[in-house]
Image (cartoon, rainbow, N blue to C red):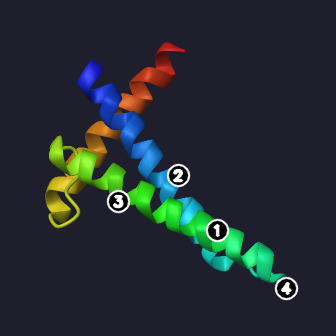
Amino acid sequence: MGGMSDQVIATDFLISAKAGIFAFALTESGSSEVRDILRKQLRIAVDTHEKITNYMISRGTYYPHNLKKQLETDMKITETALKLSEKS
């Protein structure tokens, strides 16, 4: 299950990176210093998202251009997560 655990962790990390991008995109500020910091944070989040995506694609665990294959993969991840929660 080691490979599947890596996939679950990477998927969770990818979702978190996406959530961070969305949150920063909605953020408004009246301060130019804060906006500069937020821009830097946004660039870091986008770069992180790209690295995670490329990692998952290279390992054959993420299929952004094949919806059917991605849905199958997501279902396996969901089943694994449910099994792990039952053991806790």
Q: Identity of the amino acid at label 4? A: Gly
Q: Residue at x 50, y 24 (%)?
A: 85
Secondary structure under the numbered disc 2 in the rendered image: helix
- Return the mark for residue 30: 4
Residue 45 vertical placement versus 36 (above, below): above
Residue 8 vertical placement versus 64 (above, below): above
Q: Identity of the amino acid at label 3? A: Glu
Secondary structure under the numbered disc 3 in the rendered image: helix
| Percent of width and height locating residue 52 | 35, 49
Q: Determine contact: label 3, label 2, CB under 8 Å.
A: no
The residue beneath circle 2 is: 16
Rendering quarter of residue 66: bottom left
| Percent of width and height locating residue 13 | 46, 45
| CA separation in Å, label 1 and label 4 | 17 Å
- Return the mark for residue 50: 3
Instruction: Answer few, some or many: residues within 10 Å of disc 2's Cα (few below 14, many 20 plus, some between 14 and 19).
Output: some
| Percent of width and height locating residue 61 | 21, 44
Q: Residue at x 32, y 38 (%)?
A: 77
Rendering quarter of residue 83: top left
